[in-house]
Amino acid sequence: MQKEKLERLRKELPDLVFEIFDQSFDVEYTHHSTAIEGNTLSLIQTKAIIEDGLSVGGKTLREIYEVVNHDHAFQFVKRQVRQGKKLDETITKELHALLMDRLLPQKNDWEMKVFF
């Protein structure tokens, strides 16, 4: 029943409505996911980074890269789902690489290491 309502709405509402919803969801999802891990960027700062490509003052590069990487990784996951791909080791490693880009000394470092 809910799926039928959604399909009806998709036909009745302009595509722009869904594009705006998707953008808003992506920003909020990235903000909350990185905040859970200790990132201190606000929702507005996260939006500026993702949608406008702006940097924000007073924050570390690590926090900015965490947001950028999370957004890239989420977009990657959405593409994989749209293409009907199943989660496998290759996709998992690519996802890890996207999340850790510019955060680890080696981009494709799969093993868990402690860096001092």
Image (cartoon, rainbow, N blue to C red):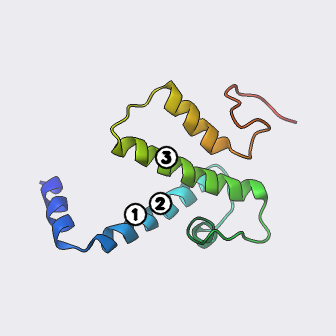
Q: Position of residue 56 (x, y in %)?
A: 73, 70
Label 3's element?
helix
- Residues at marks 3 and 2 touching, judged by CB atoms closer than 8 Å: no
The kind of residue on which mark 1 rests is Asp
- Residues at marks 1 and 2 touching, judged by CB atoms closer than 8 Å: yes
Lower position in the chain sequence, tag 1 or tag 3: 1
Q: Residue at x 52, y 28 (%)?
A: 90
Q: Residue at x 43, y 31 (%)?
A: 87
Structural distance between the alpha carbons of marks 1 and 2: 6 Å
The kind of residue on which mark 3 rests is Phe
Q: Residue at x 58, y 51 (%)?
A: 70
Left or right for 39, reference 90: right
Relative height, residue 78 to residue 63 (above, below): above
Q: Residues within 10 Å of mark 1 (few under 14, many from 20)?
A: few
Disc on res. 26: 2
List the single residue furthest toward the right. Answer: 116
Q: Position of residue 8 (x, y in %)?
A: 14, 64
The residue where tag 1 is placed is 22
